[in-house]
Amino acid sequence: MAKTKNEMSNYKPNPNDSVIVPIGLDDANRFIKAHHRYMTVIHRARYCISAYHNGQLVGIVATTPPTNNKVDDGLTIEIARLCTHLAPYNTASALISRACKAARAMGFRKVITYVDASVDGACYRSCNFISGSEFLRRPWKKNLDCYDAKKTSSIRRLDLDLT
């Protein structure tokens, strides 16, 4: 039986449920700083989405304008950070999927991301990302203490999605 509008507005999630909700950049950066393997905080974001399980924050995804100016056409957004910690199965895929749905609702046509070659990337493939080219990421400043890492670009076209 369908719930009435009044019953839905009084909905309180079960503490054992997983919930995906927006999150502020400051809270997302605290989670990134505490749990991301190697990346630092981000300084500007279009939007951040979080996943809670049993009342605990277990994952975030943060989107930014593209870091590569050649692809920044105003219709492209980049998933800059994806971080999960002690999360249930498929949390990363759920966060990426929500980020893509939000991007489509905001009028973006393409979502891109860059993934370390050492990472499997199954969560991106499950969200219909197509693997692009591999390249060697280099430090953007000569004195920056940063490692060279092989990265793979992945793209999802939102204007071609049927769902």
Image (tube, grey):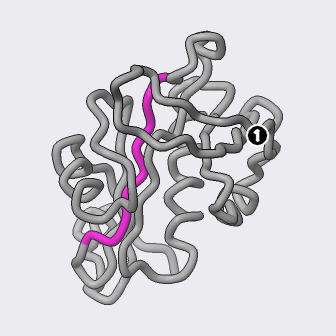
Task: Give the image location of residue 129, x and y in percent.
Answer: 74, 48
Q: Quadrant of residue 117?
A: bottom right
| Residue at (35, 60) in percent of width and height | 36
- Residue closer to the observer: 29 or 163: 29
| Residue at (52, 52) in percent of width and height | 98
| Residue at (31, 36) in percent of width and height | 42
Name the element at disc 1.
strand
Task: Give the image location of residue 112, x and y in percent.
Answer: 64, 35
Task: Give the image location of residue 80, x and y in percent.
Answer: 47, 40
Graded by Cα atoms within 10 Å as few (under 14), some (14 to 19) or many (20 or more), the crowding at tag 1 reads some
- Residue closer to the observer: 68 or 55: 68
- Return the residue at label 1: 134
State left or right for residue 26 relative to residue 16. left
Q: Residue furthest bottom?
A: 16
| Residue at (36, 73) in percent of width and height | 85
- Residue closer to the observer: 33 or 31: 33
Residues in magenta? 57-65
Task: Give the image location of residue 126, x and y in percent.
Answer: 73, 62
